Amino acid sequence: MFALDEMAWMFAAVGFVVVTALAAARLMSSRRTSNTSGAAESARAVAQRRQRVCGSNAKGNSLEESHSDERYDVIIVGAGTAGAALATALGQSGRHVLLLDKSWGEQQRIVGEYMQPGGMRVLEKYRLDQCVKEDIGAVPSSGYAVILPASPRSSSDATAADTEDSTTDTCSQASDTSTSGGRETLLWYPSHDPAGIKEYFGFIPLNQKDTTSTATSNSAAARPDQQPQTDAAKVDTTGAPQGFCFHNGRFVQRLRETARHHSNVSVGHAQVTHLLEDKSAVIGVEYAPVDEHGKVSPAARRRALAPLTCMCDGGTAGPLRKAYTSGHRPQKVSTWVGLLLKHEPHSTPLPHPGCGHVVLTDPSPLLLYQISPTDTRALVCIDGDVTDYRRYAEETIAPQLPASVRPLFLRALREQRSDGEGNGEGVCRVEGMNSDGLATKNTYRYEARCPVKGGVVALGDALNMRHALTGCGMTVCLKDMDLLCQLLSHADLNDPQQLLRIQKNFYALRREHASTLNVLANALHAVFTTPEGPKKAVRRKLQAACFDYLDKGGACTAGPIGLLAGLTPKPEILAVHFTLVVFYAVKEALVQGIGRPLKLINIPSTLSHTYQLLHEGARILMPLVVREGATFLAWWPVRKLVQVVFPWEDMLM
């Protein structure tokens, strides 16, 4: 049992409002319908055509062995995390699947490297967890370390001192976990998966283990950066939730190999050029083969037919996107600069090995996590008008880093080039490269837009994206995959009406897990970013309140970490905790402004500051929940009431 602390009254007050509104919220949510008008009208016209499409599939896995107009149960466009996992899962259920992708080589990326426990649970369900745990040098993660730096040293002093130290032995640096007078808190994953409203709110024990494991692998012949440590994955034996960090390309290749070797999955090295339609329904794809040199052969275009086409082609907008959805307008929110910190095997410079690290640097946060025994990733989040990324990272970010990390960070800035020179390992071959030679990746945000046609479903980043700060993108796409597989488990793919119902149910049911992680990622980015301007002081107060709230322990820690881990797909719980963070900031403002005993002279300014905190909290949360259609806060009467007191609707524009 958890003892109630000083936050208990706020839990009770906000929780009462949420619980009383929950039943009505679900009732209204269940009545929402996806934008599938026109598809139902053509159901009879398409039925006969689909009956011909769903014939028996060729048994061979080579497309060259198939004849014109190949027939499958499901066609999947894109063999990334979502597509490759979906192909295997559907193949396990007996569906005949065609998996198409234009690039089957190992990709080098700077995102998609952190798998939350919620995503691992899906992989375990479909026996795909070995793609993470075997032979790729994945590093277990038992939670997060959040570091709030103190006022940084001057950039010239920090750079001069740490540049001189950057050639010293890495092992000696790893023992120095000083944050130059800053504060830090550890957020451990829960001891088991939350179940029930009480544990969802955070009344659940945390798995507070001294995790020193650094990598998992069962291959004695693995490369040095893939070999395990003797105490690796010790949390696995308890069954406790656990995350993993890894090189994304290695993980995706393992997923692809698993799909390729399944007897019900056919793979094609091809670029999809068109979606084939009959009336208002998609009945297959037209694709052009791609040779081993990456050259597309338009003259050799072929057609594949299936009653269901799954779009798993990621977040990059292309001509196909317009063919199955509308209103898709990605909004760029940040740019990531990726650095690879090289070190001796099992000697990471991170202050807390076995944890992801979020450093609340000013003005934007930085992520640190170990992706192999010899590699630690640093992701610098850049918001606003920054042109010289290298100088920004060196002069603004480096002085705020933990002392154990700073020398390797500066060395990577000097040596890394994304053309394969230095220690960059060609990390920009796919992602992109700025003029200074650094690996970069833009992060976008857009809400789900349901396909306007029948016979097609979009999953993962192809459907919607959120800020990459929380590393939950793969968790969202895997949960999408799991939900779709459940809906298709006993479905008759020859029945267009049944497919339309599945399509509608998929978009309605995914809202629970997707909106939770979407709102969490975008809200945390807003709170952890302190842009210059009149709102900078207010953002700093919210950031400090968020840190103090997470540091309190009990439900204040376990509730948010359950959301972050992808184990609590409850947007209502997220709304409660975010509101409590704002209330905590208000309480601190009242205590500091008015104080004890009461100082009447401070009341006007304190009340003004309190209103600013509440107003900024509304301007962060309300646009996100309304766009997602999540929680009772998105109801028209509630949103209008909040608009009257704390105007926020201009943020929707």
Image (cartoon, rainbow, N blue to C red):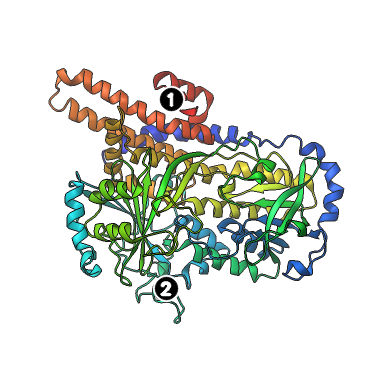
Q: Nearer the viewer, mark 1 or mark 2?
A: 2
User: 409 left or right of 241?
Assistant: left
Q: Report the side of 545 relative to 453 (left or right).
A: left
On the question of residue 181 being in view, the answer is: no
The kind of secondary structure element at disc 2 is: helix
Pointer 1 residue = 648
| Most distant residue in the left direction | 597
- The residue that appears at 34% across and 41% down in the rendered structure is 528
Amino acid type of the residue that numbered disc 2 sits on in the rendered structure: Gln
Write down the quadrant of residue 82 in the picture: bottom right
The image shows residue 263 at horizontal and vertical percentages of 70, 70
359 shown above or below 130: above
Closest to the observer, 577 or 80: 80
| Cα–Cα span, label 1 and label 2 | 49 Å
Q: Residue at x 20, y 19 (%)?
A: 603
Residue sitting at 61 percent across and 57 percent down?
Answer: 83
Please state the horizontal and vertical placement of residue 627, each as a whole percent of the image: 52, 33
- Which residue is identified by label 2? 226
Left/right placement of residue 90 relative to residue 634 reads right
Please say whether residue 427 is visible from this viewpoint.
yes
Q: Looking at the image, which residue sits at the far bottom?
A: 220
Vertical comparison of 67 with 623: above or below:
below
Q: State the residue in front, 50 or 369.
A: 369
Residue 606 position in % (x across, y down) = 22, 23
Residue 116 lies in quadrant: bottom left
Q: Residues within 10 Å of mark 1 (few under 14, many from 20)?
A: many
- Say which element carries label 1: loop
Would you call the spot at circle 2 few (<14 residues within 10 Å), some (14-19), or many (20 or more)? many
- Sequence-wise, which precedes: disc 1 or disc 2? 2
